[in-house]
Image: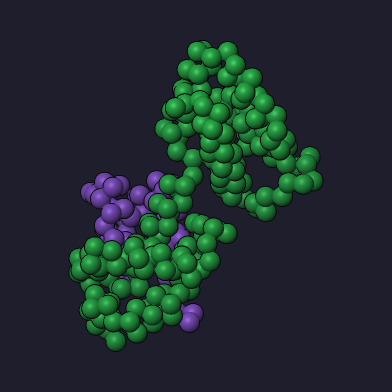
Amino acid sequence: MENNSIVINNVELLGKVLDGRATSKERRVVLKNMSDVVFDEFFMVALRATILFHEN
Amino acid sequence: MTDQEIVENLIANDVCTIRDFFFVRCRGALMYIGQYYCPNLQMPEELIGEFYEFLSSDDWHKLRIFKYTCSLNSYITIIASRYFQHKRNKELLSLDEDFYFAQKLQAERSTDHFFMDDLNRIVKKMQPFDRFLVERILIDGEKPGDILDEAKVFIENDVTLDTKAKTDAQFSGYIYTRYNRIRKGLQKQMLVMGYGK
């Protein structure tokens, strides 16, 4: 299981979760890291921002 | 255009692709992220321009290492959110830096009996709420997060103060940002007066 810093720095893994293309194991790793407030904030902001790509 | 074609054009510094990518395709997302972390600090275009500078630095290193296991949109979104969060946090209160400053104040206090007079003179000229933050956090040694209830009462009783903060998290952010600004101002004034050199 990856630790916090690895997950936070694994940009493409997080991108896959935003795309809805991550495996259940990968999603679980990311969800586990949501208890980290810094990670939770930046990931949730990214999640909300992805919607705005399609509003042009 | 596919993600790979866009990345190749960006790395080749194609002007049209750069403009369309940053200021059309990513505009909404980058504006949202930038303004979430840095509200009122910069114009949206400046935030987007700053992110372009960041992403293109080191000959587009961050795009050169992209392996296309996720979409380019998501890749950019994650990088932008991390970048602007880091930018905001750098500008906010650094607890280590604050502790260091407090230690310096203590050292000055013990070696110079005029120090507290000078400090109090500056603090007295501050707005009441700024004075409250300095007295409770810097002089009493409380953590900003521990004085939120007191600060709320203070703001409710002062009609000139309006934080526009709706949630506790927003209010905490307001207190940290305001205290950080006051502290830096105080620090500068003490340096001008010859302390801490």
Q: What hue represents chain A?
A: purple
Please state, as top left, top right, bottom left or bottom right, where the N terminus of chain B lies in the image.
bottom left
Q: Quadrant of residue B127?
A: top right
Residue ID at (54%, 14%): B112
Asked if residue B182 is positioned above or below residue B84 in the image, the reply reads above
With B173 as the anchor, is B65 left or right in this view? Answer: left
With B139 as the anchor, is A14 left or right in this view? Answer: left
Please provide percent x and percent y for residue B187: 53, 33
With B1 as the anchor, is B166 left or right in this view? Answer: right
Please provide percent x and percent y for residue B111: 50, 13
- The residue nearer to you, when weighing B23 against B82, is B23
Please state, as top left, top right, bottom left or bottom right, where the C terminus of chain B lies in the image.
top left
Residue ID at (79%, 46%): B159
Is residue B169 in sight in this rendering?
yes
- The residue nearer to you, when weighing A56 against B31, is B31
Residue ID at (72%, 35%): B128
Please provide percent x and percent y for residue B76: 34, 68
Asked if residue A24 is positioned above or below residue B149 in the image, the reply reads below
Q: Quadrant of residue A28?
A: bottom left
Q: Quadrant of residue A23?
A: bottom left
Q: Which chain is green?
A: B
Describe the colour scheme in one phrase: by chain
- The residue nearer to you, when weighing B80 against A50, is B80
Please provide percent x and percent y for residue A3: 26, 46
Is residue B149 in sight in this rendering?
no
Residue ID at (67%, 50%): B163
Asked if residue B19 is positioned above or below residue A40 in the image, the reply reads below
- The residue nearer to you, when weighing B25 against B13, is B13
